Image (cartoon, rainbow, N blue to C red):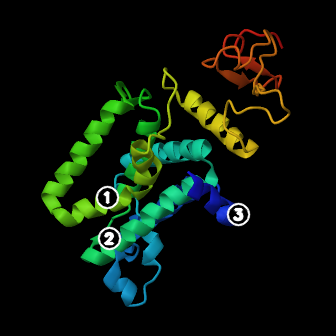
Amino acid sequence: MNFLNKLEKKFGKFAIPNLMLYIMFGQGIVFFASMFNPLLWYNFVFSWERVMAGEIWRLITFIFIPSSTSPIWFFLWVIIYYSIGSQLERVWGTFNFNFYYFISVISTIFVCCLFGMSGNVGTYINLSLFLSYATLVPEATFYLYFFIPVKAKYLIAFYFVILGMDVLSYGIPRLFLITASLAGYIIFFVIPFFMGKRMRVKPNGSYDNALHHQQQQRRRQQSGRPAGAPNQNGGGKAIKVAFHKCHICGKTELDDESLEFRYCSTCNKEYCIDHLKDHPH
């Protein structure tokens, strides 16, 4: 999106790398501190009334409220959120991921102020990360309770069922809160979808292919011309450049777009997926 590219040029230097690492670390501090002082938790939740009374830290500290008070579930959610958040940052870039998260935070604050809502309102923002990942890579497999495989695209339906139950329980204000938490999702997925610019994922739906697709798009944007554009040297035909090449067979992504490549950590050379495990060192 052009406006994001413009924002990144102006404010990209202020983006926070590994944002989810800091957020999960903050949640860990609050979680362990609350084990010694359970009332500490309530000093960080969002409350517009308390903000107006001078406790302005609540405008940001609510994102550090843990998702669960159970140690097992807390650590599980930390692993899930950090994994998904870091992978989304790799796909979109640091600035875009920062924008996604903080535009949802700002929207959530606005709705909470409008309806006088308080509490652990940051949970919905983190849940939207899961929705984004599932939309980006619908064929990814999640393991419920560590052994039940479920495709991400099916968990999207479960996600909306849970949110629907929350709306039925808490009314219209909760609907606005959930919508606000999805501000980043709406900008990155819903609006591009209706504009016919949604991202296309490779047939096998793997995360690496989605990442490769995004990297190709980013290279095209940085080169200043779209894919397939005529070469300015007058040849009238685009020159395709390979960014990956197998050290064994010499194949590139130009030979097969679905072919995946990896670097070997031992010999520090790039191989296609067919020769990654059986190549000599």
Compare marks 3 and 2 and give the one earlier in the sequence. Answer: 3
From the top left corner, tell me how far across and down residue 277 is, in percent: 70, 13
**Dots 3, 1 in contact, CB < 8 A:** no
Q: What residue type is labelled 2?
A: Val
Query: At numbered mark 3, what does the secondary structure look like: helix, strand or loop?
Result: helix
Q: Where is residue 236 in the image (x, y as percent from the top left)?
A: 77, 27
Residue depicted at x 66% and y 42%: 218
Image coordinates of residue 112 in percent, x first then y, are: 31, 72
Name the amino acid, label 1: Thr
Residue 145 visible in the picture:
no
Disc sitting over residue 111 in the figure: 2
At label 3, the amino acid type is: Lys
Vertical placement of 65 versus 166: above or below?
A: below
- Residue drawn at (38%, 62%) of the image: 122
Q: In this view, does 173 lie to the left or right of 25?
A: left
Res 167 quadrant in image: bottom left
Left or right side of 208 for 158: left
Q: In this view, does 94 lie to the left or right of 45?
A: right
Which quarter of the rendering shows the C terminus? top right
Asked whether residue 192 is in view, the answer is yes
Q: Mark 3 points at which residue?
A: 13
